[in-house]
Amino acid sequence: MSEPVAKKAKTDAPHMNIDDIVDKAYEGSVLCKTFTEIADAPISALQGLADWTDDVGKKLHIPTIKKLGQWKYFLWSRAFVTLSKYEIPDHRVAGSLLNCNKALDKDHEGKTIKEILALPPSALSGIAEHSDADLAKFKVKTIEDLGTWKFALAANSIATLAEMESADINVH
């Protein structure tokens, strides 16, 4: 009885890619970039963000895709967006302790989630008012815009999957 022949990996087999959200230089079929390499790239590596966005990103302390995906202000905003779907209008019970005061400037404490979503990003504790103009360059004018911003959502997914990446790759 003969030994089974080991199958060779097909190099033309379909592969995982995120080519529709990354710039051509980062597409999998061009240079075989990893999630980690893409996560470490400047934010302009995301398709639709021009080179000038790197300077704006640096001003906001989000110089890389990973930093954007893990940016606490995006994460807070995304949490507000997610939970807004479960908020019942005029249903707060007297004496309720549910709050997110550490995430908001004092002027906005005690507001409903839906009211918070309509506020500018500078209503978040730690974002200066002048940053609203920088975020507006990305068409992010409200906390809801920030929490649903497609580039931050993609960056979060890239950063998350970069941590799950292995050097041991099986190509079938």
Image (spheres, rainbow, N blue to C red):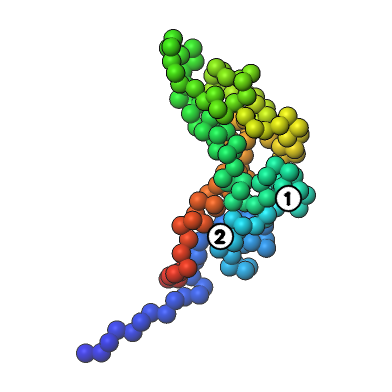
Q: Nearer the viewer, residue 85 or 63?
A: 63
Q: Which mark is residue 155?
A: none
Location of residue 71 in the rendering, given as x and y in whole percent from the top left corner? 59, 42
What's the residue at 54%, 52% (across, down)? 159
Quadrant position of residue 4? bottom left
Location of residue 33 in the rendering, given as x and y in whole percent from the top left corner? 59, 65
Q: At label 1, which amino acid type do we have?
A: Asp
What's the residue at 43%, 11% (across, down)? 95
Ranked by sequence position, the earlier of labels 1 and 2 is 2
Q: Nearer the viewer, residue 79 or 109?
A: 109
Location of residue 28 in the rendering, given as x and y in whole percent from the top left corner? 58, 64
| Quarter in which the N terminus is drawn | bottom left
- 14 in relation to 51, above or below: below
Location of residue 168 in the rendering, given as x and y in whole percent from the top left corner? 44, 69
SS label for mark 1? helix
Circle 1 sits on which residue?
54
Q: Nearer the viewer, residue 145 or 104?
A: 104
Number of marks drawn: 2
Q: At label 2, which amino acid type do we have?
A: Thr
Q: Going by the image, does 48 lie left or right of 71?
A: right
SS label for mark 2? helix
From this viewpoint, is residue 148 visible? Answer: no
Quadrant position of residue 38? bottom right
Q: CA distance from mark 1 to mark 2?
A: 18 Å
Circle 2 sits on which residue?
36
Q: Nearer the viewer, residue 50 or 167?
A: 167
What's the residue at 46%, 57% (across, down)? 164
